[in-house]
Amino acid sequence: MAAEEADRLLEDGYMVVEGVLEAELCDALREHVLLCTDEAKRLGRNDLFGNIQEAARRADLKLDLCDPVVEALNSLFHRCGPMLAKAMGGLSRLVELAAITSDSGAVAQPVHADTMHGVTRFLQSDIQLPSGPPGKAGATGDPDSEDEDQADDLGEIVRAVATETALIYTVLVALQDVEPEMGPTHVWPRTNTVEHHAALWGTHTGGKLSVAEADKLFATPHRDMLLRKGDLVMYDSRTMHCGGANMSSSRRSVFCVSTMGPGIRPDGTTWTMLKSLRNRLRLGDFPLSGEMVQAPVAKPGAVAEALPPPVAAAVQDAQGNGPAADAEEEGRPIPPLEEWAAAVQCSLCTRWRPCSVEEAPRLTGSEHGFFCKSVGFKCTQEQRYSTQEIDAIFG
């Protein structure tokens, strides 16, 4: 059965599995999630939240290994572990352990994929790859020139990204019944392809793609994940999806777990996971024993002690896990438009990025173009402002 399910997951880009968690476990985990979310917000513990689109009434809480989290992980991988192992192949590890909650009034997210298709990144670029073998001079005849070294490195990177990018699968487990007015997750089947990514990146690089626009662009209607408590949807991180608008009076919470297979880590995923747990949990480690429980469960009147303690800035810096490391993984924030002194366009994703007036000539003058990573951004970050708005401030 695992092989058949893996084939269907690879082809459709998503799958719904019913009854993975017991109702009682969902209730216990949901209470813990909501109590910790509210307390972390009250205390200003921004370190416990990941980046999420349309965050005004959404929260992406990093989870520690308390009893209900460990039990939920064990149940999840008992049912879905064999399928994930078949789909990803090789050694796989957890790269996200969180709970997403959308409150009443949360607006719909723009349609997106969590990661860009590796082949699309190659095809969408305007890069002219070096024709000679690494280390050989190109048009300049100077093998020691900075541009030639950059060309060699760039060629190898682009070829690898196009063919060796790791697969990531994300699981969202409903911790309560999801009704239509609660803003269920919308999924577009079979959109984890080069063609669909080319369509998205080729026509909507600057704006936000709505559900109706996506139905038309992808030539396939979306599916509403109207899950019952304990059901899950699993999707390829390249599959188009979004969280819907919560027009109900209830909060909608999902248990969120992502696993990554072997290969080059793709850009885009939020990597919402406590630093203390990164690179510790592999698919083959499950089921976890009771000895892995390392955090208390939040209860009314006893919530603060259930939150992971803040990591000292000095320790973060020493371990490479401080703000600089987070920025490297998630991309630096897009500043307000009025702070843009100049703008340059990425040769890979074609999005405009801010820079200083002094930086602009150097960034645009390279033979191979400018890339988001050069100034700390990620290709999967929204442009935030339309091209027309950007043009207007420089006009």
Image (cartoon, grey):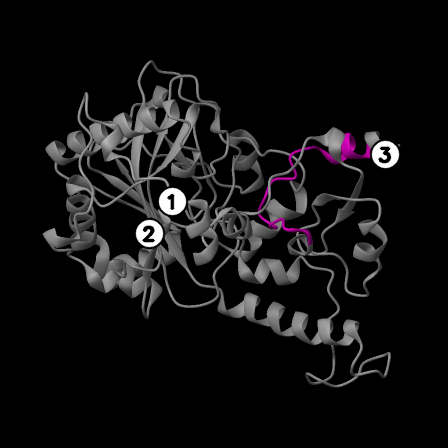
Mark 2 closeness class: few <14, some 14–19, many ≥20 residues within 10 Å: few
Relative vertical location of residue 58 with respect to residue 202 in this rendering, above or below = above
Please indicate, yes or no, whether residue 320 appears anywhere in the rendered image. Answer: no
Residue assigned mark 1 = 311
User: Quick check: marks 2 and 3 in contact, CB under 8 Å?
Assistant: no
Q: Is residue 160 magenta?
A: no
Give the structural element (helix, strand or loop) at label 1.
loop
Please indicate, yes or no, whether residue 216 appears anywhere in the rendered image. Answer: yes
Question: Which residues, given as a range, are shown in magenta?
Answer: 375-391
Left or right: 333 with respect to 165? right
- The residue located at (49%, 31%) in the rendering is 109
Image coordinates of residue 146 in percent, x first then y, are: 77, 73
Residue assigned mark 3 = 394
Q: Foreground: 174 or 317?
A: 317
Q: CA distance from mark 2 to mark 1?
A: 9 Å
Mark 3 closeness class: few <14, some 14–19, many ≥20 residues within 10 Å: few
User: Quick check: marks 2 and 1 in contact, CB under 8 Å?
Assistant: yes
**Residue found farthest to the right:** 395
Q: Is residue 387 magenta?
A: yes
Q: Mark 3 belongs to which amino acid?
A: Phe
Mark 2 or 1, nearer chain start: 2
- Examine the residues drawn in magenta and state their main secondary structure: loop
Q: Between label 2 and label 3, give the one nearer the viewer.
A: 2
Q: Splitting the image into 4 quarters, where does residue 120 fall? A: bottom right
Left or right: 187 with respect to 251? right
Image coordinates of residue 365 in percent, x first then y, are: 84, 59
Image coordinates of residue 114 in percent, x first then y, are: 48, 47
Q: Between label 3 and label 1, give the one nearer the viewer.
A: 1
- The residue located at (75%, 29%) in the rendering is 338
